[in-house]
Image (cartoon, rainbow, N blue to C red):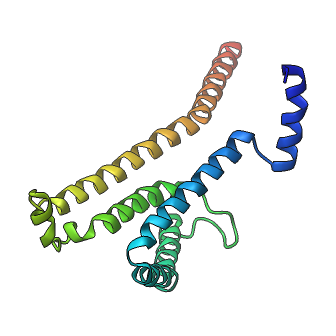
Amino acid sequence: MNRSARGPVLASFRRRYGASPLHLLLVLASFALALYAGIRLLKGDAVGVAIWFVGAALLHDLVLLPLYSVTDRAAQYLWHAGAAPTGATPRTSINYFRVPAFVAGVLFLVWWPLILQQGGHYTASTGLPADGFLARWLLITAGLFVASAAVLIVRTWLRLRPRREERRAQARAQARAQARARKSAR
């Protein structure tokens, strides 16, 4: 197919599908990978995997979702401290707290047995010591919050920079006008 004929075909595909053919290919590949992983996972203990999956879904929906929803609402309330009226759209600065908290939470969820020193089989399986994970997790969490705060400070400074420059220009213009007024008064 030549280039000139390919344009309308791709445009028609994109209009009907909503995305490029590459997107469809990647979605189909991810489904194939998930199917392969599911078959391999269920090959060993299908009932145990099903119980774990249902238990994880129930734990998430009944315990974790309300917990982090309430935590997010409390963080929004504390972050804004009543600055925004009720019903106003939340400011995006709360995301500078949400993102490092989310990443730290995921790291804790993955490594909690070692962080809480509950991984006795870890040393036997790997031959590596299981100590120091709490300190590392705390350092990583602190680093995430420090990096997020630095990004917030830089972005706020860059956003406010044009206002500062405008105020300085107005102050210089006022000073010149006052100097001219004094000069003409003499």
Q: Position of residue 8 (x, y in %)?
A: 91, 32
User: Residue 22 or 100: which is nearer the viewer?
Assistant: 22
Quarter of the picture containing the C terminus is top right
Q: Is residue 14 left or right of residue 168?
A: right
Q: Position of residue 100 (x, y in %)?
A: 41, 56
Q: Position of residue 29 (x, y in %)?
A: 60, 49
Residue in view at x 55 percent, y 62 percent: 35
Q: Is residue 125 left or right of residue 78?
A: left
Please identify the quarter of the rendering in which residue 124 is found.
bottom left
Residue in view at x 39 percent, y 78 percent: 45
Residue 99 visible within the image: yes
Quarter of the picture containing the N terminus is top right
Residue in view at x 70 percent, y 47 percent: 24
Residue 92 visible within the image: no
User: Residue 151 or 41: which is nearer the viewer?
Assistant: 41
Residue in view at x 74 percent, y 41 percent: 21
Please identify the quarter of the rendering in which residue 166 is found.
top right
